[in-house]
Image (cartoon, rainbow, N blue to C red):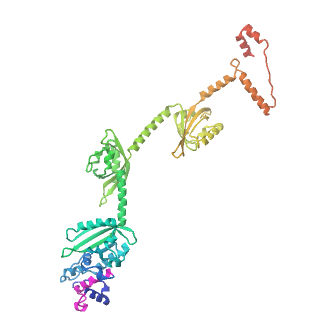
Amino acid sequence: MKRKAEFPNDLSRPDFWSVARRLADVSKTPREYGRDDPRWQAEVGIRYFLRKYSLKAEKVLDFDSAFSHIERSSDGFSNGDADVGFLTKFERRVLLSGKTAEMISDVFENGPLTYFVWDSRDRFRATGVSPNVSRNFGFSVEEFLYGKKSFSDLIFPEDLARVKREFQENTASGKNTEFDLRYRMYHADGRILFVHDHTSVTYGSDGNIASVRGYVTDVTEHENANRMLNDYVNALDKSAIVQIIDRDGIVRYVNDLYREVSGDTRDIVGKSIRIMGGRRYHSKEFWKDLWETVLAGKVWKGVIKNPRSDQREAAYYNYTTITPLQNEKGEYDRFLAIKFDVTRLKETENALRQTSSRLEKILDSTSQGFWSIDASLSIREVNGSFCEMLGYSESELIGRNIREFLNEENRAILERQAHAIKHTDHRLYDLSFTRKDGTLLPVMIRATTLRTPDRNFLEAIAFVTDVTDIKEFQERLYLSSITDELTNLPNRRYFDSELLRRFDDAQIGNVEGLSLALLDIDHFKRVNDGLGHDAGDQVLRHL
């Protein structure tokens, strides 16, 4: 025996049957028709659906629009559900199982899809709406069914003209049609929502629109996410080369910035990446490592150098990040390359490297010593001349504090200069370093403080000049100025200055007594006059 179609148990309640019978204007009672008769259940099923979705069932949905949606939402019937061969086409459309009706009920009460029926002849006034309109858009069913709200009231003003135009374009054929609309509409609390509206238009036998049904979904979060993603993509598109390459090395996509950076006006889509010329500058091992990395599903990062197409011998550099992309089978068959132009940075880096190399050669070739120290006066860098001056190797100096190579007297000088670092950028002073062999090395130091743009200490550098010869020469000059050339004894200048110093000491009590002795050589003039001045000089040196 074939199984009969079943409706929810609450349909068997006497009061519900009577209401359904009255609303459906069914002339026969269940006893006359037979409660299991599918024709009776079809009539009652219609009213069950209407009652389920509206406070005023007779005002909510006309039969055609209601069951057009039911037919769209259900899987239909098989001959195993019921013997429906004797039913009309309309009756077969509405003969639903209780499970399907329950599913539809849940969709339109709790789901995100809101169902509207609009009257296209009356400002698109709502003639039907699903109860979840309150949950999704904040409006009550009554606001629509009693004419308080129309489509024009809901849609955002700036979108209204466009939506009307698109509606007219899609319905110009005069045939039943379905199409999608996207627009902004108001929530009851004043928020503006982005919605997707799948619109279904049905024409009557008179050639006029009979019904307009809209299945509206709030896509605000999705739209905002898309807008943010588009903003990111646009920003990236303007700042980086974007390429998609397949596992065979064929370019599948490249943005316009590639032409600007590379000077390559050719269409490289569909061509091998070898056309870009990067193999000219990189080894086979470089490319092997890149491909092995991305084919293993790992991200590769590095700088790739390519020749410019519009300038001979010119090149450009890209800091490149390559991300593997999976297909539906989980295979890595495409690779997204994001390339930032770092040509100026690399050129600056190369220029700095060359400048640094020249400076190193200059520092190593000069006879002056050089050091670089940090804020704690620890040595960071020295040249060969400074190592030779102190008798240490470079490894014996790097990392040690400069104070370790000074005696107490010279350490005090350095501390004063270290304090001056805070408020002066250039300093000139004398020190004496203690060599590895224990001897003193007098030097003259020209120090400079390097600072950050906000004037914070970065490092201190100094050029060190060995002034041993200068010191010795100064000492000889001083001795010659206070010594008699003939006798090597202190001369009159020294005597005068020493006498004044002694008198000063006596006055302040630094000496207990002060004596002055005068010596004279009798008849010395006779020696000079009789024997000559050379003989006189010998007498003076002898005495």
Residue at horizontal 79 percent and vertical 19 percent from the top:
519
Residue drawn at the location 29% of the way across and 66% of the way down: 163
Task: Tell me where residue 445 sits by quadrant.
Answer: top right
Asked which quadrant contains residue 41, the reply is bottom left
**Is 307 above or below relative to 440?**
below
> Residue drawn 74% across and 24% down?
496
Q: Which of 465 and 267 lies nearest the eye of the viewer? A: 267
Q: Position of residue 1 (x, y in %)?
A: 21, 85
Furthest residue toward top: 530
Q: Residue 505 colored magenta?
A: no
369, 23: nearer the viewer = 23
Q: Is residue 335 above or below residue 47?
A: above
Q: Name the foreground residue: 519 vs 124.
A: 124
Image height of 332 relative to 124, above or below: above
Name the image quarter holding the C terminus: top right
**Residue 74 visible somewhere in the drawing:** no
Residue 208: % across, % down: 21, 74
Residue lying farthest bottom? 31
Most frequent secondary structure within the magenta stretch: helix
User: Is residue 339 in view from this perspective?
Assistant: yes
- Does residue 339 appear to the left or right of 396 in the view shown? left
Image position, residue 122 (x, y; %): 27, 75
Task: Indicate the quadrant where residue 219 lies.
Answer: bottom left
Q: Is residue 294 above or below residue 399?
A: below
Name the residue: 36% across, 72% down. 137
Residue interval drawn in magenta? 25-54
Q: Is residue 42 found inside the magenta-colored segment of the image?
A: yes
| Image mark count | 0
Q: Is residue 75 left or right of residue 144?
A: left
31 or 208: nearer the viewer? 208
Provide residue 283's location: percent of width, then percent of height: 34, 43
